Amino acid sequence: MLSAVQLRVARPTDNIEALIPFYRDGLGLDVLCRFENHNGFDGIMLGKVGVIFHFEFTRAQGHTVGRAPTQDNLLIFYLPDHDEWTAAINSMRSAGFMPVPAFNPYWDNFGCTFEDPDGLQNRYPAWQLGT
């Protein structure tokens, strides 16, 4: 049964358009689906075809979400290959996103942290941690 599992991480946002460059251009994800005014919600799903996870960002019309509730709200991407890890960091920087200090100093010793426009931190632990 677990072989058929797909993970969708869904969260609200006030500005879908501001998130697209971070997740598409920086992280290299593809826009898989987009919808407007579905029962008062707009949304977008980003991921890669054939990968078991994707992200969904939704905006409820007339509702304000605000920024991430704490600095320790995070997504962590473990990349086991050093070249892949370096390419991911370079991709974020090339897309105009600079590393930020992590709330937990452990992550600054062993990786690189980027913050999306909503304040959600995305971490790339040092590639050795994924091996």
Image (spheres, rainbow, N blue to C red):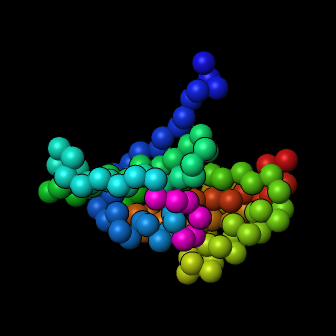
Q: Residue at x 42, y 66 (%)?
A: 19
Q: How many marks?
A: 0
Indicate the position of residue 10 as horizontal and vertical percent values.
Answer: 41, 45
In the rendered structure, which segment of residues is drawn in magenta?
Answer: 25-31
Q: Residue at x 51, y 47 (%)?
A: 54
Q: Please tell me whether residue 47 belongs to the stretch shown in magenta.
A: no
Please name whichever residue, 89 or 119, is drawn nearer the observer in this view of the structure: 89
2 w.r.t. 97: above or below: above
Question: Taking 57 as reference, is 76 left or right?
Answer: right
The N terminus - image quarter: top right
Question: Taking 109 as reference, is 26 left or right?
Answer: left
Q: Residue at x 17, y 55 (%)?
A: 61
Indicate the position of residue 98 as horizontal and vertical percent values.
Answer: 59, 77
Of all residues, the one furthest to the top in this rendering is 1
Indicate the position of residue 100 as horizontal and vertical percent values.
Answer: 59, 72
Q: Please tell me whether residue 28 belongs to the stretch shown in magenta.
A: yes
Please name whichever residue, 70 or 8, is drawn nearer the observer in this view of the structure: 8
Indicate the position of residue 45 as horizontal and vertical percent values.
Answer: 42, 52
Q: Taking the image as drawn, is residue 100 in sight? A: no
Question: Taking 96 as reference, is 118 left or right?
Answer: left
Q: Residue at x 68, y 59 (%)?
A: 124
Q: Taking the image as drawn, is residue 36 in sight? A: yes
